[in-house]
Image (cartoon, rainbow, N blue to C red):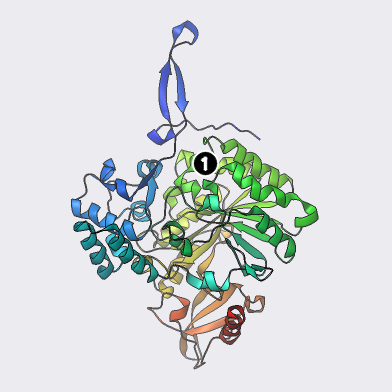
Amino acid sequence: MNMSSSENPGQTEAGTAKTQNGGPNGQNLLSIDPPRYKPIVVQQIDKVPELQSLPDDIRFSMKVVGHVLPFRTNRYMVENLIDWDNIPEDPLFQLSFPQEGMISKEDFDSVADLLRRDAPKEQLNAAIHEIRAGLNPHPAGQQTLNVPTIDDEHVEGMQHKYHETVLFFPGQGQTCHAYCTFCFRWAQFVGDKELRFISTDADILHRYLAEHKEVTDVLFTGGDPLIMKTKALEGYMEPLLDDSRFAHIRDIRIGSKALTFWPYRFTSDADADDLMRLFEKMVKGGKHIAIMAHFNHEREVQTPTAREAIRRVRDTGAIIRTQAPLLKHINDDADMWARMWKEQVRLGLIPYYMFVERDTGAKRYFELPLVEAHAIYRKAYSQVSGLARTARGPSMSAAPGKVQVLGIEEVRGERIIALQFLQARNPEWLGRVFFAEYDENATWLTGLKPAFGEKEFFYEADFEAMKQRLAS
């Protein structure tokens, strides 16, 4: 495998050019320092040069929201992806920087008042804690329904919602190179230990997987597992090559936004080559490595660094699958989705999911009605070839499972929304089509009512009994 990068870096984040004497005939030699990752956090908003042209009240509103919802970006994002001539409407700006509408006016005014009068830190933190508690920090029963056990003890930093898939939250990967403003895992990043899924115990992961032969897939998630050093990732992944214990583990997924937020992780970071070798070793050892890449907008795959990163990952034999929620202000545009899927296919990526924005955090700012989400999906889907029609959606990652909006139909004179489970807590629910009353305002499964006068959806009694068993 070729470990060298073919990119010719140009902008600041691509490295600092230096001239040195000492070449033949005394000519200057050009050396390139690889870019160094440096986050931009809420305390630095007033120091970001690109924000200086914005009114003071706009920057202040960013700081207010950034105290409630986690904020982090970096110079690569600021210099390469945001269109600073289109602020604040630019989609990548909306993806990266807090906006006033992301929390309620009441909550915004409360925090703004505390900041303006320089309230004691304890008072500010108490107010923020109360606001966060009302933002549904762990949707879909993550803390109550998904946590597995060993010897009747809950296993920290792990979720086992679906029969064949285990999620693991490695402690070294519970942050990101930048935070998405819509993030459904925002509670991982606010410093509250009670809200976090986290584990640094590789042994407990390996023991659990060895004991559960029904599991075929392990998903390393976060945060972003690819923010950790390759050496740490090796400690979790390489033992899975032991066929005597883990022959049943066929697929290793890594949920990551690094291809957007810091593609240098794959090209010029100090251990980028080590990461490529790890992927290659796992593939040669018989494991399917899938990078579950989060791309929210077509612009994210257009930089030379991102494309070089994609090439290097694919050269290892790893597969890149792409997924994203449908978001107002960022990507509620069917034509953009179609262009993005086409370009992803051209680059060798596999479109995988269009999600519905989850019922947590800044959902009110980003959410779209389900009927509108389906219309956008259908229009985008109709513009692409079969190679891009691998993208499933719009899909809700709800408490019972992943529920797809199949379409809007008229049955027996009644307009209805057709749905089905793409993934489910009970495998017997999979593929079952069921129907909800037409509702042009509903944005989530819990906002829908069964069609045809039914009292409940087919799965609800079973799901309720399941919750009771898990609670006992």
Q: Nearer the viewer, residue 277 or 158?
A: 158
Residue 175: tell me if it is visible: yes
Task: Please tell me which residue is depicted at 43% across the width and 61% down the height of the picture.
Answer: 192
Q: Residue furthest right?
A: 244
Q: Nearer the viewer, residue 73 or 148?
A: 148
Task: Please tell me which residue is depicted at 50% across the width and 47% down the height of the picture.
Answer: 259
From the image, tell me which residue sits under label 1: 265
Q: Quadrant of the C terminus?
A: bottom right
Q: Residue furthest top?
A: 25
Q: Position of residue 238 (x, y in %)?
A: 69, 47
Q: Position of residue 291 (x, y in %)?
A: 58, 52
**Is residue 188 positioned above or below 458 on the image?**
above
Q: Position of residue 117 (x, y in %)?
A: 19, 58
**Is residue 92 positioned above or below 313 on the image?**
below
Task: Please tell me which residue is depicted at 27% across the width and 51% down the height of the picture.
Answer: 87
Q: Nearer the viewer, residue 85 or 124?
A: 124
Q: Position of residue 397 (x, y in %)?
A: 52, 70
Residue 403: tell me if it is visible: no
Tell me if mark 1 has few (under 14), some (14-19) or many (20+) residues whose alpha carbon lies within 10 angstroms of its own: many
- The amino acid type of the residue labelled 1 equals Arg
User: Is 379 placed left or right of 364 in the picture?
Assistant: right
Q: Nearer the viewer, residue 427 or 121?
A: 121
